[in-house]
Image (cartoon, rainbow, N blue to C red):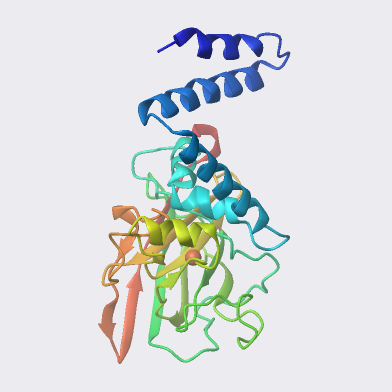
Amino acid sequence: MNESLTQNVTEAFGHCADARTKEIVTALVRHLHAFARDVNLTHDEWRRGIEFLTATGKKCDGIRQEFILLSDTLGLSIVLDDINQHHDDGATESSLLGPFYRDGVKEAALGANIAQSDGEPVYFHGVVSVVSGKPVADALIEVWQTAPNGMYEGQDPDQPEGNLRGRFRTDADGAYAFHSIKPTSYPIPTDGPVGQMLLATGRHPMRPAHIHFRIDAPGYEPLTTALYSSDDPYVNSDAVFGVKPSLVIEYVSKDGGYDAARDFVLIPRERA
Ligand SMILES: [Fe+2]
């Protein structure tokens, strides 16, 4: 093994003027070389890797981003989430934003129903606060989830505009509440190279049922997270690794539907 090969390449970046770029490219070279040596990569395997990445690029267009899907399914996206989240004891953990967030949803009154699809009714409610317990009034809460067919509004021309998307403000006590239906598990797109990779490696493409939340209030770190259903068959094998134990919730049977209670704890900006 000739270690000087790797050194030659990292030294070739020695004149890079931007320190951060230099740090990233040289670390990339070191890890890439170590990876190839670790698995004794053959020329044939290298070529198949190139073909896979080429197909991944060709699958991308203005809407479809197969490389992000690859990052998600390799767990890179959730590692990034972990690196960049401001960890604070007691604060709600973050989760992936995902590709289906949409801006510009009309604000609704607390207690409104965001579902225009039939499904099992759920009453979502809770309180937004800081670690000290002080409630956060007037926090913006945005939620979005799939319909029972496993599709988000925006993916599905048959769903009414704005279906299963909501935008609310917490009241003076930090409380929020809205009606919806139980979210459904869904597959990530499988008609491209990433789907073939999952199939070839014995993995399934399913994300466990979840409802996305984005919470934003002046003076606090914005929180992007999701609540995962404890009774979902995929809750322990999310295809994109977004599930964290603290984000798994119970849907409690109540009045012919479900009650889903969940509080959120934000981090003040000055402590982030
Ligand atoms: Fe999602």
- 209, 270: nearer the viewer: 209
Residue at 53% x, 70% y: name it.
Answer: 144
- Whole-percent x, y for residue 178 in the image: 48, 77
Instruction: Classify 34 as above or below 165.
Output: above
Q: Quadrant of the N terminus?
A: top left
Residue at 50% x, 37% y: name it.
Answer: 46
- Whole-percent x, y for residue 107 in the image: 64, 72
Instruction: Classify 151 as above or below 9.
Output: below
Instruction: Classify 2 as above or below 233.
Output: above
Residue at 49% x, 27% y: name it.
Answer: 32
- 198, 268: nearer the viewer: 198
Q: Quadrant of residue 138?
A: bottom right
Instruction: Classify 215 as above or below 165.
Output: above
Q: Horizontal placement of 64 versus 144: left or right? A: right
- Whole-percent x, y for residue 121 in the image: 40, 86
Q: Horizontal placement of 74 versus 14: left or right? A: left
Q: Quadrant of residue 250?
A: bottom left
- Whole-percent x, y for residue 259 in the image: 33, 78
Q: Horizontal placement of 62 versus 189: left or right? A: right
The answer to whether residue 43 of the structure is visible from this angle is yes
Residue at 37% x, 67% y: name it.
Answer: 208
The answer to whether residue 239 of the structure is visible from this angle is no
- 115, 18: nearer the viewer: 18
Q: How many marks?
A: 0
Q: Quadrant of residue 132?
A: top left
